Structure formats: C-alpha cells, structure tokens
Amino acid sequence: MTLSIYLSFRNNAAYDRWWAARKLWGALVFEIRNLARATTSLIGDRAEQRALLMEALAFCHLLRGQLRRIDSTKDARAFIGDAVDKAAARTNPAEDMVRRMGRRANARREAGALDPIGFRILDERLAAIAAIQAGCERIAGTPLPFAYTLLLHRTAYVVCLLLPFGLVSTTGWATPLFTALIAYTFFGLDALSEELEDPFGIEANDLALDGLCRVCEISVFEALDETPPKMIAADKFYFS
C-alpha cells in the first residue's frame, strides 16, 4: 500500500512536469504564430519581416538544443546564417536571440518605420516568448528530489524480495509468476516516471520538439507567403 502511494505520487509529479512542458511548447507555437501575424502586419519592409521571423525560428531551435543539451546550431544556421555563431558563444543562446529580435524591432521604431503602439505589440510577443523559455528552463533545471527517487527504488526492491513469502501460502507453485507480474508493474511504472521526469529528452515518450519546431517553421513560412517545409513524418510511430 505504501509503495503504491509512493509510485502514484511520483508518477503524478512526473506527468505534471511533462504536461506543463507540453503546454509551454503549445504556447510557444501560439506566440510564434502571433509574432508572424503581427510582424507581417506592422512591418512594411519585406526583408525586415523575414529577418525578424527567421530569428524567431532560430530561437526555437536554440531553445530545443539547450533543453535537450545538444548542439542545435546547425539547424539555427539554416535561418540566420553565420549570425548563429555569435549567439552560440553566449551563456544563453536562445535568450540572445530574443534580445536580437528586440533590438531589430526597436531599430524600426527609431527609424520611424514602426509606431510606438506597433512596437509595444511586438515587444509583448517577445516578452511572452521569453516567459515561455523561463518556464522550460525551470522544468529542465529542477528535477524531482533524488532522495525521494532513491527511497522509492529501495522500497520497491525490498517489497519485491519479500513478496514471495507473503504469496506462497495462497498461490503455491504460481508464486514466481505472480511475483514477476507485480514486480513488472512496479518497476514499469517507476521506469515510466523516470522517462516523463525529463520531458525534453529524446526518449519515445518525451516531447517531439523537432516536430514542434517544424510546426513553427510551417506557420512562419506560410505567413511570409513562402513554400513551407513538410511536416516531419513519424519513424515507426515515433516522433522526435
């Protein structure tokens, strides 16, 4: 009973982290679409529209790289070229891209090509994107307490070792079978919670950040009236 309570609490906590991360990336897709709509409406210069939105896509890929602890500069380079090298040299490359977009919008305001209200609209979109990044970093940087995980592992092992002694009087020769089934359930739930605990990883049940970045790309290119890339297809029902 006690072990079931522990497992339930840990699985709920792990799923809450996974779902919170999914909502944040859903909000990011929403904000990128809003930014694309606002940019194409408020900035008249086609080149400036495209430059700002390409920086937004580079931000998505750099954030994905930071959360997964991988090098995503190659993907970001496809949108902003060698400018990604300067961002990659920063402590927080994704944050540097938000600052870069803010400076670009402010330059349009100072040049008189963007009125104060239009600048405020764009700045609010950038502030929302920065808030989403901070939420993702909070989840990635705050794992479940290790002491609790260790206690759960040890309790599961002890229960499974003692379980045959409690079942043998009623299950007889089938005791190993019932013990194996119960142990599989306990350790299966424990393994699942470990996988969900880090929703930004590359395991099968982690978030499909590559696919979500591609959704942002499609939205931006369509907003620019350009041919969008195709959605990433599943590889044996697996989305990366």
Image (cartoon, rainbow, N blue to C red):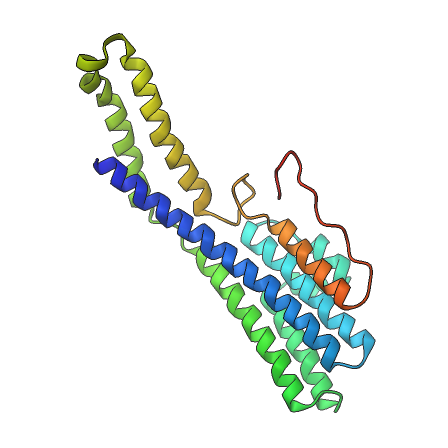
Count of number-bearing discs: 0
Q: Is residue 155 visible?
A: yes
Q: Residue at x 81, y 80 (%)?
A: 45
Left/right placement of residue 169 relative to residue 104 reads: left
Split into 4 quadrants, where in the image is the C terminus? top right
The percent coordinates of residue 90 (x first, y second) are 61, 64
Q: Is residue 47 above or below residue 221?
A: below
Q: Quadrant of residue 173?
A: top left
Q: Quadrant of residue 92?
A: bottom right
The percent coordinates of residue 62 (x first, y second) are 63, 58
The percent coordinates of residue 217 (x first, y second) are 71, 59
Q: Is residue 77 above or below residue 2?
A: below
Q: Camera-side residue: 177 or 197?
A: 177
Left/right placement of residue 24 relative to residue 151 reads: right
Q: Is residue 82 visible?
A: no
Split into 4 quadrants, where in the image is the N terminus? top left
Q: Residue at x 33, y 44 (%)?
A: 10
Q: Residue at x 27, y 33 (%)?
A: 154
Q: Quadrant of residue 93?
A: bottom right
The percent coordinates of residue 157 (x first, y second) are 28, 28
Q: Residue at x 41, y 55 (%)?
A: 142
